[in-house]
C-alpha cells in the first residue's frame, strides 16, 4: 500500500485532455520526481491530488484510503501538504507569522499534541531561518521566501509533501542547500513528490521519476533509466544536454 497513489487519472479542460490515465505512487522515505515540458500537466496532477481539481476519471488514495471525493482540508488532515509554483506567502506578515498561521490551522484540527509554537520553532531550526524570521515576507529574497513556503508545509507535520517547482529562482548554492533539506526529510520518513525544472537537481535527489508529456506518463524509472530514455530525450531533455528545451 502506497503512502500516496494516483490511479488512472484523467482531466479535461473544455475540449482539451490535460491528463490521460496518469498513475503514480509515492512511498515513505522516497523522493519522487514529476518532470516534463511546460503545459504537460504537472500542476494539474498536484491539483487533483490535493482536491483543487476534480478529475474526469480516476482515483487518489492516501494510505490506501480513497480520498477522491474528499475536500482539500480533509486530505490535508490525512497528512498531505503542498507548496505552490507561485509563492503564496502573506506579504505583510513576518516569516514567523506566516508559519504560525499554517501551524494554527493544523491545531484547529484537534489531532495535534505538539503545540503550534513548537512546530514553528522546529521548522525554523530545521530550515535555518533565524536570520530573517522576523522580517516581513515581502522583503525576503526568493531563496528565503521558498524556505518559508516549505516551512509552512512542514509545520503541519505532513507524511507526504508535494513541491511545485520549489527551486525556481534559486541560485546554485541555495539549490544545493534546498536539496540537502529534502534529502534529510526523506531520510526522516517523509514521502516527497517533486515537480521541478532543474534537471540536474531532480537526477541527483530523486529515487524514482515520472515523465509527463501532453498529459500522459511517457516514462517511469530511476534517474539512470530516464536519462537514457529516447522518448524523454526527444520530448524534454534534448540531445543529451540535460537541459530542458
Ligand atoms: N484551470 C484550467 N483551465 C483550463 N486549462 C487549464 C487549466 N489549468 C491548466 N490548464 C491547461 O492544462 C495544461 C496543463 O497545465 P499545467 O498542469 O499547468 O502544466 P504544467 O504544470 O506541467 O506546466 C496546459 O495546456 C494548461 O494551459
Ligand atoms: Mg506547473
Image (spheres, grey):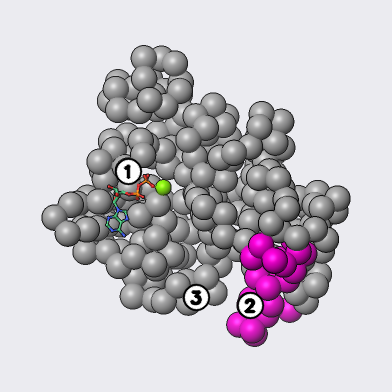
Q: Looking at the picture, tell me which residue is in the foreground, 5 or 146.
A: 146
Separation (CA) of disc 2 from disc 3: 10 Å
Nearer-N-terminus badge (2/3):
3
Which of the image's four quarters has the N terminus? bottom left
- At mark 3, the secondary structure is helix
Distance between mark 1 and mark 3 Cα atoms: 26 Å
Query: Residue beneath label 1, please?
Result: 39
Q: Is residue 151 left or right of residue 118?
A: left
The numbered dot on residue 73 is 3
The correct choice, above or below, for 185 with respect to 48 in the image is above
SS at badge 1: loop
Q: Earlier in the sequence, mark 1 or mark 2?
A: 1
Count of numbered circles in the view: 3
Q: Position of residue 57 (x, y in %)?
A: 22, 63
Coordinates of residue 99 in the picture (x, y in percent): 71, 66
User: Distance of mark 1 from mark 2, alpha carbons?
Assistant: 32 Å
State the image quarter where residue 104 is shown. bottom right
Say whether residue 30 is visible: no
Q: Is residue 137 magenta?
A: no
Residue 159: image quadrant is bottom right
Amino acid at each position: 500500500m502506497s503512502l500516496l497513489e494516483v490511479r488512472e487519472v484523467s482531466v479535461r479542460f473544455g475540449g482539451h485532455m490535460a491528463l490521460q490515465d496518469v498513475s503514480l505512487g509515492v512511498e515513505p522515505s522516497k523522493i519522487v520526481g514529476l518532470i516534463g515540458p511546460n503545459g504537460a500537466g504537472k500542476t494539474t496532477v498536484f491539483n487533483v491530488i490535493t482536491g483543487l481539481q476534480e478529475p474526469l476519471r480516476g482515483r487518489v488514495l492516501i494510505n490506501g484510503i480513497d480520498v477522491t471525493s474528499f475536500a482539500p482540508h480533509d486530505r490535508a488532515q490525512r497528512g498531505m501538504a503542498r507548496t505552490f509554483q507561485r509563492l503564496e506567502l502573506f506579504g505583510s506578515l513576518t516569516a514567523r507569522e506566516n508559519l504560525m498561521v499554517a501551524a494554527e490551522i493544523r491545531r484547529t484540527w484537534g489531532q495535534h499534541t505538539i503545540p503550534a509554537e513548537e512546530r514553528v520553532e522546529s521548522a525554523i531550526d530545521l530550515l535555518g531561518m533565524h536570520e530573517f524570521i522576523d522580517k516581513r515576507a515581502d522583503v525576503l529574497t526568493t531563496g528565503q521566501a521558498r524556505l518559508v513556503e516549505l516551512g509552512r508545509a512542514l509545520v503541519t507535520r505532513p507524511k507526504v509533501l508535494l513541491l511545485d517547482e520549489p527551486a525556481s529562482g534559486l541560485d546554485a548554492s541555495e539549490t544545493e542547500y534546498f536539496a540537502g533539506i529534502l534529502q534529510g526529510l526523506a531520510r526522516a520518513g517523509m514521502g516527497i513528490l517533486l515537480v521541478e525544472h532543474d534537471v540536474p537537481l531532480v537526477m541527483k535527489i530523486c529515487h524514482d521519476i515520472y515523465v509527463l508529456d501532453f498529459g500522459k506518463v511517457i516514462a517511469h524509472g530511476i534517474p539512470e533509466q530516464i536519462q537514457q530514455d529516447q522518448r524523454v530525450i526527444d520530448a524534454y531533455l534534448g540531445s543529451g544536454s540535460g537541459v530542458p528545451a
